[in-house]
Amino acid sequence: MNAGRALLRRNAGIGIALLLAIAVTASASGFAHYRVRPGDTLSAIAARYHTTVAALVRLNNLPGNGNLIFAGATLRIPGHGGHAGPATHGGSHVVTSTYVVRPGDSLYAIAGRYHASWRWIARRNHLPSSLMVVIGQRLQIPRWVHTRSTRGADPFRGRWIPSRTAVASMIRSTAARWGVEPRLVLGVSYEEAGFNQHMISSVGAVGAMQIMPTTGQWISSYVVHRTLDIYRAQDNVTAGVALLSVLLRETRGNSRLAVAGYYQGLASVRSRGMYDDTKRYVANVLALRNRF
């Protein structure tokens, strides 16, 4: 058994397919209440709502790793109470972008594109209960970004930045260790960043695999069980490969769904289907896979 598969076996309890969280109410206590349906994993819910499996288990008094929760139950999610909108928190702060709605857009697609909360966008823009957006409408998009200790400082400072060729080589060897098809990971990295480790997106995704800091923390804690520095090339590649390995396991080896989950989030794909931009992303990655 290779190292990657061994780590996944250790986390089998976290990855049991059980839930799809649907927000139904919010309370002033700092928690949201969610109705659950079959189809997702507790770990995916934790990652989506920037919390941990342990916190969900503890808050809801779940047995074991939470693998005995059934459809129709209600979960409490910490830190998602009935506040009017986002505020500063710890080492992060909220920035607001303006987006003009284009043909084919939906609120969920826009939120996915910006890695933002559709609830925040709806509240900020006073959208109707139908959540309909109109072509040409200007939306304010609030989202969390991580605060750097020194304005303008390069977070890659002091770290070796390998060439694109070296990054591709790292991807091949790391994917092989995790039992993931190297060409698929190469396709994701090329579509995300062109194998460029020295890259941070407008929404804060980092490096050759475009890993969000919160995703990196989740993978560190629950998948690889060691601290990953996503500004370091090998750790960034490891995070991306590990995430794809989890997604492939959750989708029973369905590359198309796994890639969609990498871009849009697997919970969102399962509950809402693929957004139009997700479909384009998946098509691009699968086409690129055939080039490597």
Image: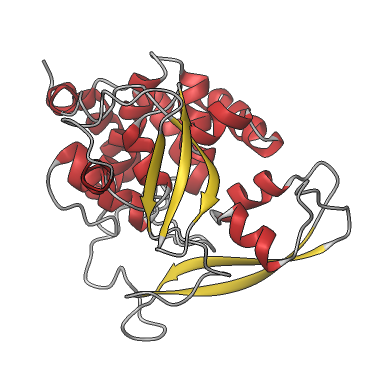
Question: As drawn, which residue projects farthest toward the bottom?
Answer: 151
Percent x, y of residue 129: 76, 50
Depth check: give the residue in front, 70 or 15. 70
Percent x, y of residue 198: 39, 60
Task: Residue at 33% x, 34% y: name it.
Answer: 42
Depth check: give the residue in front, 155 or 218. 218
Percent x, y of residue 281: 60, 35
Q: Is residue 188 left or right of residue 24?
A: left
* Quarter the C terminus occupies: top left
Q: Is residue 173 left or right of residue 184?
A: left
Percent x, y of residue 256: 52, 21
The image shows residue 89, relative to residue 64, as above or below, that is: below
* Quarter-of-image position of residue 209: top left
Instruction: Count all numbered tags in the image, as a single digit.
Output: 0
Depth check: give the residue in front, 262 or 91. 91
Q: Is residue 201 left or right of residue 248?
A: right
State how the image is colored.
Answer: secondary structure
The image shows residue 28, relative to residue 148, as above or below, that is: above
Report whether residue 291 is seen.
Answer: no
* Quarter-of-image position of residue 153: bottom left
* Quarter the N terminus occupies: top left
Task: Residue at 21% x, 37% y: name it.
Answer: 223
Depth check: give the residue in front, 218 or 158. 218
Q: Is residue 52 left or right of residue 10?
A: right
Report whether residue 141 is seen.
Answer: yes
Task: Residue at 15% x, 30% y: name it.
Answer: 64
Task: Residue at 28% x, 55% y: name it.
Answer: 230
